[in-house]
Amino acid sequence: MSLEIPFDNAYARLPDQFYTKIAPTPVRDPKLFAFNTELAHELGLNATDLQSDDGVGFLAGNDLPEGADPLAQVYAGHQFGGWSPRLGDGRAILLGEVRDRNGTQFDLQLKGSGPTPYSRMGDGRAWLGPVIREYLMSEAMHALGLPTTRALAAVTTGEVVLREGPLPGAILTRVAKSHIRVGTFQYFAAQKDKEALVALVDFALERHDPSKDGALGLLDGVVERQAQLVAKWMGIGFVHGVMNTDNMTISGETIDYGPCAFIDTFHPMRVFSSIDQHGRYAFSRQPDVAMWNLAQLATSLLPLIDKVENAQASIDRFPGIFQRAWLDVYRQKIGLETAQDDDGDLINDLLTRMTNGHADFTNTFRALGTDSARDAFLDPNLFDEWDAKWRARMAKEGATPENRLERLHQTNPAVIARTHRIEEAIQAAVAGDRKQFETLQKALKTPFEHPFNAPELTHAPTDEEVVPQTFCGT
Ligand code: AMP
Ligand code: MG
C-alpha cells in the first residue's frame, strides 16, 4: 500500500521476553470516526493519507504499512493492591515508534485491535463508548497542559462487541512517549530476570531521561515526574480511578482512561469507578497511592541498586516534591503571585468550604474574583467569608483586578470533559449522530476560553443529569 510511516522498531529490538510479536486482527468494515489532524502534523504524518481508505485500513489494523513490527508488550501489576504476575497488552498492539518535529520518539499503538496471548478471558476488542471517552479525556488533558497519552484517531470496525449487550466495536490509535509501566519492571523483577531489568532501565533512560544514569537515576526521574503529574491531577479535579501499577507510566504521562472523571461537585473522597468499592483511588488518596506504586517500582529495581537506603531515599523525595508542586498549582489557581507560609491554609480552607458548600470544582475556581463565585455554593456565606480573607491577601500583591482575572482565566478552565457530556456524546454516537462529540471535542481544545457557541458545556450537571458512576467498560 502507498501509506508510508517512518517507523523505528526500538521496542521490537529488545529481547524476546519483552513481548509477543503479533499483528492486529482485521475488522470487517472500518470507518473513520475521529481524526486528530493537529497531532498528525506534530508527528510529521500525512493527515490526508491517513484519512484515505488505505489510511483508515491502517488505523483499523487491517493493512499495516511497511516497516511496522507489531507486538503486544508484556507486563505485570498490582491491581487494587492484589498482585497479578502477568497482564500485558490484552487488547492493544504496538506498531512501532515515530519521531515528532522535535525529534522526540512516540509509540503508535492500536487499542481494541484483537486478541493477544495476554488477553486472558477478554476478546481483545473495545466498543465505541470507551474509545470516545479516552479520545475526549486524553485530548482534554493535553489541552489543559497535563502530560498524557494522546489520541490520533478512532475508527469503528463494523463489527459488534458483546458487553452488557451488542455494541459497536471501535479502535483507538494511542500515541505515548512510551507504554512502559511500573508493572513492566515488576514483571521482570518477579521473573528474577536481571538481564531484562538492566535492558529495560537502559531503554527507559534513553527514552525519558538521557541525562540520568542507572536504576537509581531512573527511579529519581519517575518519582519527580509522577509527583508533578499527580499534583496537576489534583489541581484540575481529575480522578484517575484505576491507579494500578500497570496503569502508571515511567514517562510521567497519564495513561489508561477507564473509569476516570473530572469532579463536578467537590468532595475530597470522590470516587467514580463502579469497581472501587472501598475508595482506594479516591481523589485525595491519589498522592499516597502514587507513592505506594513508586515503592513497588523501587522494590523491582532493588537488584540493580547497591543499597536499599538509596532506593528508600529516592521514594522519600515524593511527598516534598508533590507538596511543592501542589502549592505551585493552587497558588496559581487562586491568583497568588507571591508565596507566603499560610498559603496552604488559605487554599485548604477554600477546598473545605467547597466540600461543605457542595460547590462545583471547576466553576468555583473559574469564577474567583467575580460576583458569581458565591453562586456555586449551597450556602453562599461559606464563600463570602473566604472571599474576604482572599481579598485581604490579594491586597498585599501588586496586580490589578483585571490583570489578576486574566491570569486566573488562563489557569482555571471554563470547559472540562464533564462525565454527563461525555456520556451524552457516546449515546448519540452509538445512535449514529456525531454532532455532540464534535461540539465537545472542539470546545475541549481551548478549555480556557468560554465556549460561546455551546455555553451548556460549562454548566455543572443538574441532579437529573449527574452520572454518579463510571465503568471500566472495556
Ligand atoms: P485495564 O484495567 O484497562 O488497565 O486492563 C487491565 C488488563 O486487562 C490489561 O492487561 C488489559 O490488556 C486487559 N484487558 C482489558 N480489557 C480487555 C479486553 N477486552 N480483552 C483483552 N484484554 C483486556
Ligand atoms: Mg491498563
Image: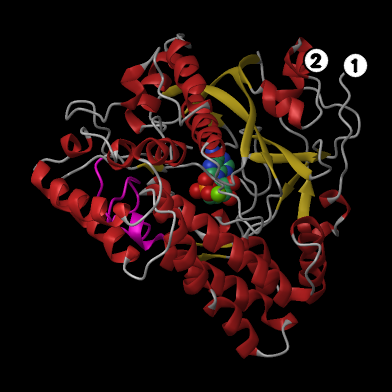
Count of numbered marks: 2
Q: Which residue is mark 1?
A: 2
Q: Is residue 291 magenta?
A: no
User: In this image, 470 relative to 98: left or right?
Assistant: left
Q: Nearer the viewer, residue 472 or 395?
A: 395
Q: Position of residue 443 (x, y in %)?
A: 47, 22
Do labels 2 and 1 touch, CB within 8 Å? Answer: yes
What secondary structure do most residues of the magenta stretch adopt?
loop
Disc 2 versus disc 1: distance between alpha carbons?
9 Å
**Does the rendering let one see residue 384?**
yes
Residue at image position (35%, 32%) is 419
Q: Nearer the viewer, residue 296 or 320?
A: 320
Q: Position of residue 90 (x, y in %)?
A: 62, 45
Q: Which residue is mark 2?
A: 49
Kind of residue indicated by mark 2? Asp
Q: Nearer the viewer, residue 1 or 150?
A: 150
Image quadrant where residue 342 sits: bottom left
Kind of residue indicated by mark 1? Ser
Residue at image position (49%, 70%) is 291
Query: Which segment is the magenta one?
Result: 265-286
User: In this image, 401 relative to 441: left or right?
Assistant: left
Q: The N terminus is located in which quarter?
A: top right
